[in-house]
Amino acid sequence: MVMAAAEEQTIAGPVPGLSVIRVVIADDHPLVLSGLETLLRDYPEFAVLDRCSTGAQTIAAARRHRPEVIVVDLHMADMDGLAVVHELRDLTPAPKFVILTAQIHEDQLIDSLRLGVKGVVLKEMAPKLLVQCIHRVQAGGQWLEKESASRAMAKLVRREAKARELATLLTPREMEVVRLVARGGTNKEIAAELFIAEGTVKIHLHNVFEKTQVARRAELVRFAQEYGLV
């Protein structure tokens, strides 16, 4: 979708005494990027400091301009929007992030919230909703796409229930071992990571297999994914 200018245009240019919101925009589709710029420049309360087509450009622009709000596409060729947020989350003063996307999975939304993203807007929505979103997050509020947010909250509740169940089944050390197995670690690598003997890793895995009734490493990976350990 190409974001068009708002239906009711306002007078372009700065307005004396108006509080300006300084924004950096990022999308790797040129038409979308141009549409975003056109949209925001039609509102005198926005100052578009830079337009970026890659994650690297967005990071550089944010560090150079120190914007108040960064609107970034979730899916860019060189770096996804969440990686950009992660890179810039400790910037001072801290910008507020708005994710722009065609679609978002509940896991991506959960990751967004953990990273401190305050706004998520679908590209299919009316352009004026992006304007409202920026206003809300700049004022300290939150703006999330309702359907995705509902699914994400439901998934978080399920994960928390599974985490409580898992805590009664495995010890904290056993959960660490399972998590590292799920990330592809060998016994030797896990031993080095946890500063324990390789034989101790084998003992932990033996206990895990017995407690979870899992027989193979591949099954343990699926177990870890189901219980949110990766």
Image (cartoon, rainbow, N blue to C red):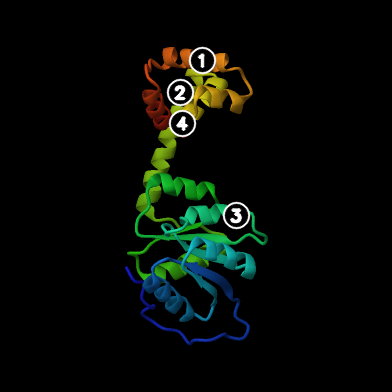
CA distance for labels 4 and 2:
24 Å
The spot of residue 42 in percent (x, y) is: 46, 81
N-terminal label among 4 and 3: 3
CA distance for labels 2 and 3:
33 Å
N-terminal label among 3 and 1: 3
Q: Which residue shows up at 46% across the image and 45% down it?
A: 110
Residue behind mark 4 = 184
Residue behind mark 1 = 202
Image position of 183 with respect to 118: above or below = above
Q: Front-most of 17 and 200?
A: 200
Q: Quadrant of the N terminus?
A: bottom left
CA distance for labels 1 and 4:
15 Å
Pointer 4 local density, CA inside 10 Å: few below 14, some 14–19, many at least 20? few
Residue behind mark 3 = 89
Residue behind mark 2 = 165
Q: Are marks 4 and 3 in contact (CB under 8 Å)?
A: no
Q: Secondary structure at mark 2?
A: helix
Pointer 1 local density, CA inside 10 Å: few below 14, some 14–19, many at least 20? some
The spot of residue 183 in percent (x, y) is: 47, 33
CA distance for labels 4 and 3:
28 Å
Q: Secondary structure at mark 3?
A: loop
Q: Which residue shows up at 49% across the image and 29% down it?
A: 185
| Res. 59 image quadrant | bottom right
Dot in front, 1 or 2: 1
Q: Amino acid at mark 1?
A: Lys
